[in-house]
Image (cartoon, rainbow, N blue to C red):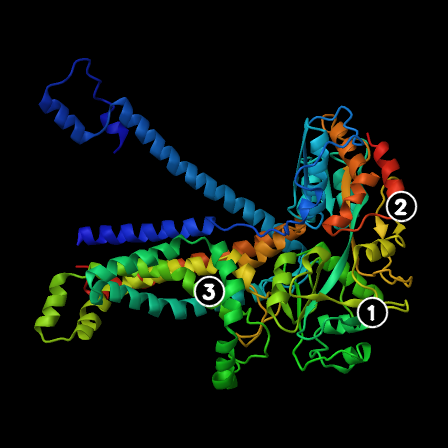
Amino acid sequence: MKLQRKNRLRALSLGAVAVTGALTLTACGSDDTGGGSAGGSSAPANSKIDCGDAKGQLLADGSSAQKNAIDAWVKQYTASCKSVQINYKGSGSGAGITAFTQGQVAFAGSDSALKPEEVTASKEVCKGGQGIDLPMVGGPIAVGYNVPGVDSLVLDAKTLALIFDSKITNWNDKAIKALNPDAKLPDLKIQPYHRSDESGTTDNFTKYLIAAAPDNWKYEGGKAWQAKGGQSAQGSSGVAQGVKETKGAISYMELSYAKDGMSTVDIKTGATEPVKATVENATKAISEAQVVGTGKDLALKLNYTPTAEGAYPITLVTYEIVCDKGNKADTLPATKSFLTYIASEDGQGLLADAGYAPMPEEIITKVRSTISGLS
Amino acid sequence: MDISTTKDTPLPSTPPPPAAEEKRAARGATRPGDRIFLGLSRGSGIFLLAIMAAIAVFLSYRAVLAIGKDEGNFFTTFEWNPTGNPPVFGIAVLAFGTIVSSIIAMAIAVPVAVGIALFITHYAPRKLGGPIAYVVDLLAAVPSIVYGLWGALVLVPQLDGLYGWLNDYLGWTGIFEWQGGAPRSMLTVGILLAIMILPIITNVSREVFRQVPQMHEEAALALGATRWEVIRMAVLPFGRSGVISASMLGLGRALGETMAVAMVLSSSFEINLSLLDPGGGTFAQNIASKFSEATEMGRDALIASGLVLFVITLLVNGAARLIIARRKEFSGANA
């Protein structure tokens, strides 16, 4: 019997090894859509990029929403400034800010401006200064839907709020019909998808609902979805996949994900014509934003209820977060040089190809002057 | 072996006669190699305990920090908003989802795994049994993220039919009521987990069934038992404790599975009585989903939920050991 027990033990330990092996093999989802190839495969050296005395490795981390834009910039920039390596990890805004306040990265990317307690924490790494927000990348949050036979759809903030709160549950609902008199709306269950992970996209989408439909969206808002009901999936690619494979599904996502197998909703604002989710329309809406940051901080307050023609109301702005004073001496030249490039006309010009919206002129001018004063 | 017993024997400068060497070898180690090895292995043991203690202290400390700030009840709140003002979070939904999805997985996987193991060891011709065992082993080598991808892209779109059928015939129970949402629910997670834990349970059960003494089986055959009766009277009683421990290994994986669940489940902080409607969540899935954007407070809250999962896993393992220890006495197989 001894031998037998030994064998069983071996079998058990084999099983245990298999369990632990399989558990450690898990990995993380990524939001990459590959849109970062906007820079083209062979980026020629750009004479307008001022490398200065930048050299060495520049580490950055943060928002995955702007990762494709950063990738496109890095490709262009490092083609000109070969002595700099830039490594932007898109592990999420929260992780990026934490890495920044712990002094692990030179700058962070974030979907939302620094909170007061984060500014306080940043004072420890920014000797004599503090962390500031530089708005750099904008983008429309598209509402994608999958309803067979309906190629164009108009919704307003109120109907969107009711749909995502599971109050309107069928596509042939009166409220949707009223906005789309010509569409053939089927008798189909609406399946609203939201993000199961915490996300700046959720934050901005719900901010829009709160601002534009305060009577129909009673939730507090934030990066975590708060309404009950509906479906959820992880990451922008997850919700996009969910919409594609589910008839009757609708969800919000960055514009670059809303393609193949879904259409995007035109939003009825105060303007005469419903507004399509495009990069230009997003920039128009962002230009109505107000700078609410104090001092060198350029945090924006977006206007979610624009009434101008062709201003798309559901937008997202991501920030680069750096120290206004007290940046590390060995990374300051590279940081400054890279940020100067991405805020330049050239840098902002790359954004539209990657599915992002450039910052409007009056905002980016302020960003440029702030960058030139970094120390 | 205690070193102190050999301390009084001085190291001989010349090779001792063979008889003396034999005697010394039997008493214990005095050579440098032995002492180094003893030191290394003892050090490893202590190191492991120290690491475990450090992890436990760290986790408990962070968890206590988070729970101290929690304005809701940590065990009964149906919400997860640690960064809210005030912070409110609770593990009720996660505990429910973790346990329910694991129970579904076990209910599907254990009978199938025992069936496969019996087929391989007692029914299949040797030529067929080998390859089947090999394929089952391969299932264990697939990383869980791949199961997640497969589940989200292939399995979920295929389940509408099954869900409709369950709703038609079993919908009256309430547990199998379906509102027509995409099938990204606890039942789908359970099915996926069942496939993932199948190879572990099958492998261990197979090994156990193979150990059944030939004498028992032949004795049963000699008494005129059919093959099914042999399995029922000789094989299954002998293998019971082994199958239970195999199931517990599988349950451990099901409880802690992360990415596959995160990719397939439509998570939300509510408990649905129906297994077919989206909603719910599990500990590991929630940590994976919330971690990347979590602030310090959010991370502490996630660590607190991880501690609860740790305790649940400990309880499950303890229960399994109790069952096995008790069964051993009655089965008569471990003589």
Chain holding disc 1:
A
> Amino acid under label 1?
Ala
| Circles 1 and 3 on the same subunit | no
Chain holding disc 2:
A
For label 2, the SS is helix
* Marking on residue A361: 2
Q: Is residue B173 visible?
A: no
In the rendered image, the vertical position of residue B310 relative to residue B229, given as above or below = above
Residue under label 1: A213
* Marking on residue B296: none
Position of residue B260 measured from the top left corner of the image (x, y, whole percent): 51, 59
Position of residue A50 measured from the top left corner of the image (x, y, whole percent): 79, 29
> Amino acid under label 2?
Glu
- Between B299 and A72, which is closer to the camera in this rendering? A72
Residue at 86% over, 57% down? A285
- Pair 2/3: label in front: 2
Position of residue A315 measured from the top left corner of the image (x, y, whole percent): 79, 57
Residue under label 3: B192
> Amino acid under label 3?
Leu
Position of residue B182 measured from the top left corner of the image (x, y, whole percent): 58, 72
- Pair 1/2: label in front: 2
Residue at 62% over, 55% down? B290
